[in-house]
Every structure is written in structure tokens, then in C-alpha cells.
Amino acid sequence: MPAKIEDVARQAGVSTATVSRVLSGKPYVSDDLRERVISAVQDLNYRPSRVARSLRIQRSSIIGLIVSDIQNPFFTSVVRAVEDTAYQHKFSVFLCNSDENSEKETMYVELMVAEHVAGVILSPTLGQNDIYRHLAEAGVPAVAIDRRVTNVDIDSVLIDNVGAARQAVLHLLEMGHRRIGAVIGTPVSSTGEERLRGYVEAIQMYGIAVEPEMIRTGAPRIVTGHDFTNELLGLPQPPSAIFTGNNLLTLGALSAIHERGLRIPDDIGIAAFDEMEWMYFVKPALTVVAQPTYEMGRTAVELLLQRMEDPDRPYQEVLLAAALHIRESSSRRLGA
């Protein structure tokens, strides 16, 4: 198997960014580090890709931003923060929407590498995609937001999804609910997997068996939330409360609940992930997990700028806390 840039970095005891700087002939690399990299390249017979060799060209002052669903208001808020912060540092933003499609994501990353952007911020469609490694090989600084990347070292800004989901479901349990439905995004993404894990942990903390029929996972879309909620409400023993994993799933769930003529919280309770402006018009008011979306975007740009300035700095994972706002949609205590 041909050697990869990670193999060179490991043998030389440096970061992949340093390997890229040496191979692209960039300055500010000590003679000792440069010799170690060259020696490792020769020992491993490493051949850098054509893309990596092209990086001798000066980069621009453009930051690439790839979001996984531009229609999701969560990402709208993140994009605003990225643009605001980038502008303050005299960078402009090149925005792309992968639409939860790994092939589109790959195309956009390749485009950004070819355009020599200063760095990339992305919400990954998958936990592992070879294109993330290509960013490192090309020496392009990158930051992952909202979702984890597991197959390459990368700075990341994430939410404590497990803790936030657990807290929301524990609240429903404290209100007396024992059959709690879960409508959550696909576990293929780290956010979906982590929110599902938080749901399961909360149920188990109460000594209740986790019932697979109470759990629905799929694409985080409005139609998915609608259909999954309908399935749950149509069970012989339907849930008395539902936990939804993002704002689009919540919209779908609310639609299904209203179509059935059910009253919130009298007939069914609900706690949702994401606090969006449209929710202020929902009556009764929704119990929600509010994510610090603006802080996520701002922090991502700051991490990217730090990586540009110091490619060999240790990689960071910034874990932001979410806040549970308890409101009327979960206010009815069962048995009271």
C-alpha cells in the first residue's frame, strides 16, 4: 500500500501540515524539521499528489464553508457567524451546500483545494471520507463543525449532544412520562448517534428498558419528522411524549400531531432539539435545547485562523454546552 502523508508525519514526528509545508517549499520550517520530513519521505518512498504539489501557488484570502443543509435554520445562524467573524479579519467566505450528499461534498472540497482557499470550515456528511484526508495532504487548514471527523486529525467545534439530549429526556421522565418516542437524525452522522445515545442513557437511568419501537432515525427533514411521528402515534401503545432531534424533525412532528387533533401538552408532551425564531410563534411554547450556533461559527473561524498561523499547534476539540429551556409543551405532569 502506498505511503500516505500521515505515515510521513508519524515517522518524522511532525504534523501533516508541516509535511505539506516542506513538500510545497514554503518557508518558516526549521532545517531540522525539514531534514526529518525529507528523510521520512525517502524512507517510505512517498509520492505527494498532484494537488499537494500545486500548493506552491499563493493562497487567497477566501475561507471555504461547506454546510450539509443550507435549508436548515441551524446552519443559517452558523453561516452568519462565520461570515461576520471572517469579515472582521479581512477574509471573505465562499459558501457551498453539500445537501447531505458525500459526492457533492467531495466535489466542493476538491474545488476549494484547486482554488487555493486559505482554509475550509465544513459540517461533514460522514464521519469518514477520504476527502478530509485530501485536505490535510494539500496542506489546507480545516475545521469541522457540528459533526465529528474520525479518520484524520482536524480541529473541531461541537455541541455536547449526548449531555443535552440526556437532559431533555430526563426532564420528560421527571414529568412522569415512561413511553417516550424518539425522532432523531440518522446515526450515520455523529450528531444523530450522540443524541440517540443521550436518549438511551436517560431511559436507562430510570431503569426502563429501551424499546426499539419507540425509536425512529432517518434523514433530518420535515417529511421524516412527520412520517416517523405518525408511525409512533399509530402504535397500539403510543408514546405519551416525543423527543425530536432537530428543528426540521420538530416541524414535521408538530404537523403530524396537529393532523391527529392532539393537544400539546394535554394529549402528548414534546421536547425538541434546536431553538429557532419560528418557534416563538408556536403555541403552546416549546421546550427546547438551545444550541450556541453563533458561538460555534465564531469559534470555528478563530480556530482556523490559529491553524493558519501555527500549523503545528495541537489539534483542538471545542465542546460547547447547550441549554434546556423548559416551557409549556412539556409542562403537564402525568398522574397529577
Image: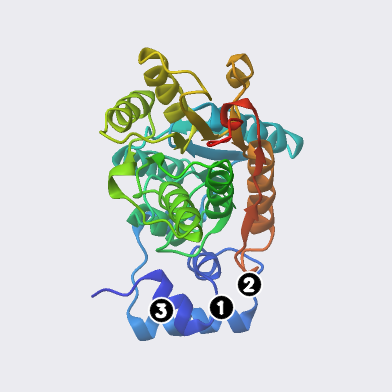
User: How far from the left and from the top, in percent, is residue 69?
Assistant: 43, 31
**For the point 51% across and 60% down, which residue is it?**
205
Which residue is more in the foreground, 151 or 192? Answer: 192
**For the point 35% across and 71% down, which residue is it?**
4
List the residue tagged with mark 1: 34
Q: Is residue 170 above or below residue 218?
A: below
* Quarter of the image that includes the C terminus: top right
**For the point 42% across and 18% down, which residue is it?**
262
- Numbered marks: total: 3
Please tell me in which quadrant of the rendered image residue 110 appears. top left
Horizontal relation, residue 190 to residue 265: left or right: left
User: Which residue type carries mark 1?
Assistant: Arg
List the residue tagged with mark 2: 29
* Element carrying mark 1: helix
Q: Is residue 275 above or below residue 59?
A: above
Please tell me in which quadrant of the rendered image residue 86 appears. top right
Which residue is farthest front?
Answer: 336
| Circle 3 Cα neighbour tier, 10 Å, few/some/many (<14 / 14–19 / ≥20) | many
Does the residue at mark 2 contact the one at mark 1 (Cβ under 8 Å)? yes
Q: Earlier in the sequence, mark 2 or mark 3?
A: 2
User: Which residue type carries mark 3?
Assistant: Val
- The colour style of the image is rainbow
| Circle 1 Cα neighbour tier, 10 Å, few/some/many (<14 / 14–19 / ≥20) | many
**For the point 55% across and 32% down, which residue is it?**
74
Horizontal relation, residue 17 to residue 4: left or right: right
Measured in 3D between alpha carbons, the distance from the residue under mark 2 to the one under mark 1, in whole angstroms, is 6 Å
Q: Of the numbered discs in the image, which one, if any, rests on residue 41?
A: 3
Measured in 3D between alpha carbons, the distance from the residue under mark 1 to the one under mark 3, in whole angstroms, is 11 Å
